Amino acid sequence: MLIDTTQLALERSISGATQRQEALAANIANASTPGYKRVDVDFHGALAAALGSSDAKTKLATTSFATQADAGVGNTQADGNSIDVENESAKMAANALEQQAAVSVAKTRNAILRSAMGVN
Amino acid sequence: MSMFGGMEISASALTAQRLRMNVTAENLANAETTKTADGTPYRRKEVTLESVPGKGGFGAQLSKAMGGGSGVAPGGVQARAITEDSTDGKLVYDPSHPDANAQGYVRMPNVDTVTEMVDLIDAQRAYEANVTAMSASKQMFAKTLEILR
């Protein structure tokens, strides 16, 4: 098969990181909104569960990620807001790097496939 | 949210923070305004923000159709209201002032320049944080496009 489990997992992790980026951007955008609670996407957990199952490939292709309110939040300010901008920025930087790493690997794997097919 | 969801969310926050800066600037500009159109001293204004529930565009619908994908769609932020601070400003004794009362006291606006400066810095830092978030989103989209090359 041209598209193997690894390539599929890479593709799904790029999509998960993109979705997580939206959630983190929303958190930073609402840093001064009274009563706002932070949201996050646990795409690592969903991907790990899919990869660990017996039929990883089908599971990967159909898995989707949910943006959920984060229950375990540390500090809540007097106005009910639970956003720590520094923390969100750090998470966003890590998430961006992760997405870029996945893209680089996916790109290289595509290049290998292309050279094996004799296309340059 | 569309493909550029992250950037749209950050853009809505930039608009909201700019509005906060504009209102703070208005407060500072009117720190000495003792008479407005209705004859009363100027009252400081405050912006209250609220989060916008995400509409969930194609991506959200697709993941819903594929099973799962529940939860909230992240949206942006918008101004809910610009409210006036109803506390009274301090009375200053200045009999020569045109707005002085019979006893020679003038009711000043309830603007405290120190509070306004702190609000201004807060809005400015929040604006910068959102600019950073937006450029991170932009870099991610640019990187994704590299797969095609």
Image (cartoon, grey):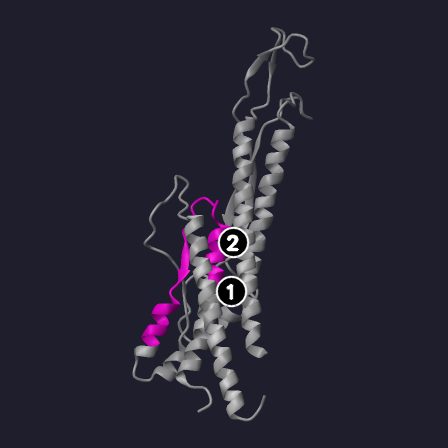
Q: Residue under mark 1: which chain is it in?
A: B
Q: Is residue B51 left or right of residue B19?
A: left
Amino acid type of the residue tagged 2 in the rendering: Val
Residue in the image at 48% along x and 63% along y: A96
Compared with B113, A31 (above or below) is: below
Residue in the image at 62% along x and 22% along y: B41
Magenta region: A21-50
Compared with B138, A120 (above or below) is: below
In the rendered image, residue B22 lying in the magenta stretch gets the answer: no
In the rendered image, residue A25 lying in the magenta stretch gets the answer: yes
Provide the secondary structure element on which disc 1 rests. loop
Q: Confirm whether residue B1 shows in the render.
A: no
The label on residue B52 is 2
Compared with B110, A70 (above or below) is: below
Q: Confirm whether residue B19 shows in the render.
A: yes
| Residue B144, image x, y percentages | 54, 72
